[in-house]
Image (cartoon, grey):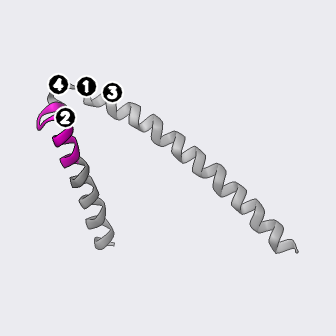
């Protein structure tokens, strides 16, 4: 599990460094970070809904195969 956490933190660091190069080191000080986070959460919710739909279709197909 610690290995997975390390991988996630590595991705986070990489994304921060990319943002730093693209927008500057302290760009977040000039933004409404809370509203940006809320917007990102809406996107995340949509991605989760899409994944649920895909999983339900997969589950349905698995049940069809089991019946054969």
- Choose top left, top right, bottom left or bottom right for residue 41: top left
Residue 15 percent location from the top left of the image: 26, 49
Label 2 or label 4, whichever comes before in sequence order: 2
Find the distance from the CA under tag 2 to the CA under tag 1. 14 Å
> For residue 25: magenta?
yes
The stretch drawn in magenta includes residue 44? no
Q: Which mark is residue 30?
A: 4
Mark drawn on residue 35: 3
Q: Are marks 2 and 4 in contact (CB under 8 Å)?
A: no
Residue 21 in which image quadrant: top left
| Few, some or many residues within 10 Å of mark 3 (<14, 14–19, 20+) | few
The reply to whether dot 3 and dot 1 touch (C-beta < 8 Å) is: yes
Rendered view: 27 above or below 63: above
Magenta span covers which residues? 16-27
Determine which residue is flagged by label 2: 23
The image shows residue 6, relative to residue 19, as above or below, that is below
């Amino acid at each position: 599990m610690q290995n997975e956490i390390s991988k996630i933190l590595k991705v986070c660091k990489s994304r921060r460094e990319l943002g730093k190069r693209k927008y500057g080191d302290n760009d977040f000080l000039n933004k409404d970070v809370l509203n940006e986070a809320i917007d990102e959460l809406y996107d995340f919710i949509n991605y989760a809904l899409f994944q649920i739909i895909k999983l339900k279709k997969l589950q349905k197909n698995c049940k069809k195969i089991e019946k054969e």
